[in-house]
Image (cartoon, grey):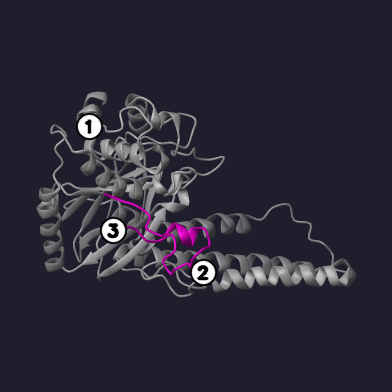
């Protein structure tokens, strides 16, 4: 028995030790820290006020706890029966009733006044310098710049942590599950208004260092704002349980100097012009396959795997799938509308060229090549199906 117990404990210790060695320890820049007990470091005035309110109210609650339980325990100890104490016989006390009404009222008002001031400031989204629409998808964020020089710039922001780290095949980095391929870029010391909505279920856009947490509802627009006081990258996550991959849709806000922001805007506009997709032209199969491989890596690989084998019991394989090998209309319908009752969400947020290219890629990849019907799908077919 001792030998078995020792071996079991040793095995557990080895697993724990191995797990510890597989994680690169260190604070995540702009995100959670190792052994963090306090709130995130504030970089906005609102976040600093939230932190102050937190500690002020915690202090008041601790003071009340000490006073109430101190009096209670003292009364129990000092007036116990063994000391021969005679219980009081009064029926009521006007002074006590006034005290237990006035004192809590004063405490509540003392807590409510500064809290109300901060909440009102949090809701004042007037006169922004930059307005950005943040759309929650299962499971990624989409950003669209609505005004200023960046008007028209839009992109999806996906988790960029390598799959090998999630599967325990590589050492987990300090930004494990808190890193994205396309961060939200904003200028420092500018009032940034974030308009939130969702395409499928309720999500929540939260970045603790910015003092921002706003739910995103399908079919509704809600807004919040922040003004970052220094540059850097600041990390958050979806804070509303939104499905299987809720833990895999982080938020990264990159705050830069105004000159760097203007250079980024110019670069993005040049990329948009260079990569402008024309769904009306006839695309070559090679073009669609190359583009589709990138779209698949950004949107599909987490569930269906790079090998197309899927996740047994959760996501079906695309390699050899009858829908992928069948008429294109069936696969187009799945991508545009999802599959109700399953984890397959709609990808209608992708443009027609992206959807056509990823369908074409899956029909040419793995063992599917040369086996299915309609191996090449043109963007015009997606336009017609919408």
Left or right relative to 62: residue 4: right
Cα gap from disc 2 to disc 1, whole angstroms:
64 Å
Which of the two labelled residues, at mark 2 and mark 1, occupies the earlier sequence position?
2
Residue sitting at x 55%, y 54%: 101
Residue 353 part of the magenta-drawn span: no
Residues 254 and 333: in front is: 333
| Frontmost residue, 126 versus 378 | 378
Q: Which one is in front in this view, the residue at disc 2 or the one at disc 1?
A: 1
Instruction: Residue 48 in the image: state x and y as whole percent.
Output: 35, 67
> Number of marks in the image?
3
Label pair 1/3, CB-CB below 8 angstroms: no
Label 2–label 1 contact, CB within 8 A: no
Give the labeled residue for mark 2.
59
Other-residue count near label 1 (Cα within 10 Å), few / some / many at <14 / 14–19 / ≥20: many
Q: Earlier in the sequence, mark 3 or mark 2?
A: 2
Please report the residue visible at 30 percent of the width from the left and 35 percent of the height from the top. Answer: 348
Q: Which mark is residue 378?
A: 1
Secondary element at image label 2: helix
Left or right placement of residue 57 versus residue 140 in this view: right
Quadrant into which the C terminus falls: top left
Is 173 in the magenta?
Answer: yes
- Span shown in magenta: 156-181
Q: Quadrant of residue 209?
A: bottom left
| Residue 183 circle label | 3
């Amino acid at each position: 028995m001792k030998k078995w117990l020792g071996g079991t404990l040793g095995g557990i210790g080895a697993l724990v030790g191995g797990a510890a060695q597989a994680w690169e320890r260190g604070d995540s820049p702009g995100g959670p820290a190792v052994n963090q007990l306090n709130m995130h470091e504030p970089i906005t005035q609102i976040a600093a006020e939230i932190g102050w309110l937190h500690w002020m109210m915690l202090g008041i609650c601790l003071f009340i706890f000490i006073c109430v339980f101190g009096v209670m325990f003292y009364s129990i100890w000092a007036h116990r029966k063994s000391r021969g104490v005679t219980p009081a016989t009064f029926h009521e006390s006007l002074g006590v009733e006034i005290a237990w009404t006035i004192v809590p009222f004063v405490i509540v008002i003392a807590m409510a006044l500064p809290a109300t001031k901060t909440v009102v400031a949090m809701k004042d989204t007037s006169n922004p310098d930059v307005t950005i629409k943040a759309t929650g998808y299962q499971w990624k964020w989409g950003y669209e710049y609505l005004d200023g020089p960046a008007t028209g710039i839009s992109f999806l922001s996906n988790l960029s942590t390598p799959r090998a780290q999630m599967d325990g095949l590589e050492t987990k980095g300090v930004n494990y599950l808190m890193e994205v391929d396309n961060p939200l870029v904003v200028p420092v010391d500018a009032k940034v208004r974030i308009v939130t909505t969702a395409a499928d279920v309720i999500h929540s856009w939260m970045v603790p260092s910015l003092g921002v947490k706003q739910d995103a509802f399908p079919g509704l627009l809600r807004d919040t704002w922040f003004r970052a006081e220094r540059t850097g990258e600041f990390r958050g996550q979806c804070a509303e349980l939104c499905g299987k991959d809720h833990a895999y849709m982080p938020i990264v806000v990159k705050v830069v100097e105004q000159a760097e922001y203007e250079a980024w805007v110019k670069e993005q506009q040049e990329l948009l012009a260079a990569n402008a997709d024309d769904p009306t032209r006839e695309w070559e199969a090679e073009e669609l396959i190359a583009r589709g491989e990138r779209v698949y890596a950004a949107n599909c690989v987490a569930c269906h795997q790079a090998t197309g084998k899927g996740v047994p019991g959760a996501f079906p394989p695309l390699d050899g799938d009858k829908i992928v090998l069948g008429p294109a209309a069936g696969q187009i319908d799945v991508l545009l509308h999802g599959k109700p009752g399953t984890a397959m969400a709609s990808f209608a947020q992708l443009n027609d060229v992206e959807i056509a290219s990823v369908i074409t890629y899956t029909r040419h990849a793995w063992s599917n090549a040369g086996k299915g019907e309609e191996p090449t799908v043109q963007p015009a077919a997606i336009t017609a199906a919408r």
